[in-house]
Amino acid sequence: MTEAKLAEESSLSDDFLGQLISVGEVDILVGVPTHNNAKTIGPIVETIQASLLTFFPRERIAIINADGGSRDGTSGLVVNAAIGDTRSGSKMYALRTLHSISTQYASTPAGGMALRTILAAAELLRAKACVVISPESTQMTTDWLAALLRPIYAEQFDLVLPTYRRHRFDGILLTNLVYPMTRAVYGLRIREPYALEFSFSGRLGSQFLAQNPWLEETARAGSEIQFTLAAIAGGYRICQSFLGAREHVERRSADLVPALRQTVGALFSSLEPNFSLWSPKTGSQPIPTTGAEQEFTLEPLRINRKRLRDMFSTGVAELESVFRAILSAPTLAELQRIAGLDEAHFRYSEELWVKTVYEFAVAYHKSVISQDHIIQALAPLFRGRAFTFLMENRNGSANDVGNNIEGLCLEFERMKPYLLEMWSGRQ
Amino acid sequence: MREMIISELMQAMQQFTRGFAHILPRIIVLVIVGLVGWIVAYFFRVLLRSILRLVKFDKLSESAGASQLLSKAALPSATELLSRFVFWVAWLGFILLGVSVLGVFGLQEQIARFFLFLPRLFVALLILFVGLLCAGFFSRAALLAAVNASLPSPRLLSVAIRTIIIIFVLSMVFEEVGVAEQTMLVAFGIAFGAVMLGLAIAFGMGGQDLAKRFLEAKFVHGRDDDGKEDELSPL
């Protein structure tokens, strides 16, 4: 295929295509999506290089940086991260050439477009295994790449997702909604369906690249979880690898709605096209996991619980007209009842939370109002659930936290028939 | 004298008979056109109702907030209302066509005006519906954004946005149908100006601190502690 023809058929720039063609074929492709990550990217790329030289010295490798219009010189840092510097202090030598290429896929960041660029490059280079690394993973060690790539490279898995050692209150949206609901609906116990570090086989990458329409909406909202869900729907071999500690990232309350869009929005929208796949499934199955499934740390965190509780109560009172369109009358009445309770007696029970989430999923499916408004309306309710989770686990051990999450997962599984009844309009 | 009276009577009778004979077929045509018009209008009504039910127009109207307005005014559903409206417009159109056959002086011009007015009426109704849809969407978007950003009085903000859009839409509708154009324009200008001035004064007098906090949080780094959920990370 000529370069001109490739450029015609591809969304990649001519310059980037030219660089890829000069690389030829590779065994492993490392994708690093970035946007203004100059502070962290240098050490991460060096760790990636050190890891590749240590564990995959015989493989043909390319590091692809898909940049969303950085203005702080991130791209230059990736390309110029000197492999020599990494080698100088040790005795690591690459037997094959290691290429580093950076491309700007757009002038503004879009996670979906970054992944698409990496997938397109992987397909063009016929990579056998690909790994995506977050530019914010400052705690990354050289073992991460090996843990993520080996199952693909040596054991023919198609998707390797990470598990981490996290703070017990970190990733609270994942532990209270995304993981339990994905598990109950699709029947697989995937701890991190929304992963920022993951690896995949070339065939899964090509399949997702061809399947996904890559609309503007897709480019914005949670392509990472869509990738996981596509692998589940396609029946690909999935496993998990324990990577170690994941550093706690400070968030602001304004980050919640985008996080809901990226994860819950993508999960809800996957339900309709995959209905025939998930509707007959009951219970859930574990998936092969290397290392621990999940670990929790217990160091104290200062969390403003009162603010969470207040935002829940205000939301329930102010958004009543919106909730009337989304929730059933008994669920809304129960939410209004608990919103009136004082802090000591407040409890957003598992059953009520599961009912709420399932009713939101059905409202999303039926588009009773704008789908984005449905996702936004979930934010204050999630804060109420987060408050209860914090209160129930504030003195708990790591085991207690794990057991509570497991209990919530079982509640999601137990109430799946409720989701199906609502979905088909029988309730 | 007697013969004269009888002759005049006979003449008047003949004239009346001639006039009646002249008008009777037209009245029959009017009745037939009216009947056919009723059947056609009824067919339109049934067809439109089926189409609107198929495309779930009531749901759209509900999300636009139009259904709530209709139920408050004790009116039927949006689908029913629109089908009835089309029925009456179609039937009235047929009746006016039939009336034009009567050849009443001056009526032709009025009928022509009615038919010229119909497209404007439809456009006005379309503007009203789309306007209500926009008002519902944007007021809900403002409500959700305000609640999630912990802004004070989110419902007031939402109602204000809804009211401004509805006032704007109504002024467009009245302008389109040509009802009191100047009055509506002036009234809209005064109402809109008053609302904006009121908001500006209210924000200036009462929202100084809020504006200060907002601008500080936006432009001064390290001063946005209010927005922090104290290190609670959702992902």
Image (cartoon, rainbow, N blue to C red):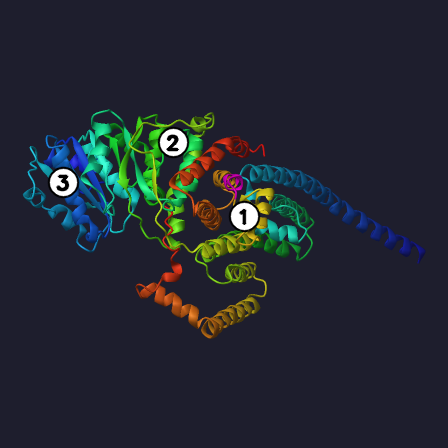
Q: Chain of mark 3?
A: A
- Point out the tag, 3 or 2, that comes first from the N-terminus: 3
Circle 2 sits on which residue? Answer: A189
What is the three-letter code of the residue carrying label 2? Answer: Arg
Mark 3 closeness class: few <14, some 14–19, many ≥20 residues within 10 Å: many
| Stretch of the chain drawn in magenta | A349-355
Residue B11, magenta (yes or no): no
Q: Are marks 1 and 3 in contact (CB under 8 Å)?
A: no
| Main SS, magenta residues | helix
* Above or below: residue A161 compared with residue A47: above
Query: Image quadrant for the C terminus of chain A?
Result: top right
Q: Which mark is residue A134?
A: none
Residue located at (58% from left, 51% from top): B66
Q: Horizontal and vertical percent for residue B46? A: 62, 37
Name the one closer to the observer, A243 or A256. A243
Q: CA distance from mark 1 to mark 3?
A: 51 Å
Residue A189 quadrant: top left
What is the three-letter code of the residue carrying label 3? Answer: Gln
Name the one closer to the observer, A66 or A41. A41
What is the three-letter code of the residue carrying label 1? Answer: Phe
Residue located at (47% from left, 25% from top): A280
Circle 1 sits on which residue? Answer: A323
Circle 3 sits on which residue? Answer: A49
Query: Image quadrant for the N terminus of chain A?
Result: top left
Dot 3 falls on a residue whose secondary structure is helix
Q: Horizontal and vertical percent for residue B92? A: 66, 48
